Amino acid sequence: MSTVYTKNQSRNNKMMKKMENGEKRPPTPPPPPNSLEHIKVREVIEKMCLDVTNTKDNLMLAKIAQSHHANKSRSDSFLYKVGNLVMLSTLNRCWEYKNSAEKHVAKFMPQFDGPYLVNNTHNEASTVTLEIPSALNIFPTFHSSLVKPFHENNNSKFPSCTLEKPGAIVVDGHEEFFISKLQFLT
């Protein structure tokens, strides 16, 4: 009995050394085709194949639903034309506002600035070039996701939002409009 044990042990040791050297373990033989174990394995494999097929179908349906909802806001034509007025997002310019001399909180910064006039459109890149005062010192081309159309206030529908124009200054019975200084905030 001891000789059988040592032969098996030496065989196992050789197998372990082969596995340590990167060699693969010999494949286990499949069960006989008519055994009960073989039938159960086949059922499990068929169920797994069915589950994989159902999963692929569900993923395809989810992909179709997502693309449908994503394409709701997209259009074939470019929204902006030369000469339109647009509002520019201040999302990427918060640091200027926060780093000014006074302590500012970015959440109180306006979300859009403008209106600005569209000088040029680039349909292939979905960008617009705006007429921006040189005092802002920023590049005038922006992606269309950073601009939105400007809608002028309808004073008859929204009288509380009407911006009143400053009145004239009366000097010696004459109305005068005098601008002493134009100042751009940077």
Image: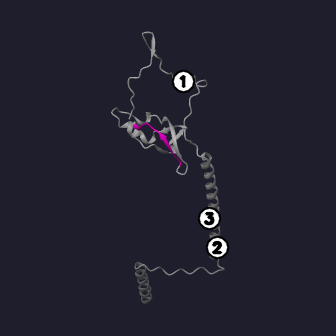
Location of residue 128 in the rendering, given as x and y in whole percent from the top left corner: 51, 44
Q: Which residue is mark 2?
A: 42
Marks 3 and 1: in contact by CB < 8 Å? no
Please name the amino acid that badge 1 sits on. Thr
Marks 2 and 1: in contact by CB < 8 Å? no
Please name the amino acid that badge 2 sits on. Arg
Quadrant placement of the C terminus: top left
Q: As displayed, is residue 137 above or below residue 55?
A: above
Query: Which residue is at the far bottom?
Result: 3
Q: Earlier in the sequence, mark 1 or mark 3?
A: 3
Q: Magenta segment: does it hold 1?
A: no
What numbered label is drawn on residue 52? 3
Closer to the camera, 165 or 8?
Answer: 165
Q: CA distance from mark 1 to mark 2?
A: 77 Å
Location of residue 123 in the rendering, given as x and y in whole percent from the top left corner: 55, 49
Residue at 55 percent across and 23 percent down: it is: 160
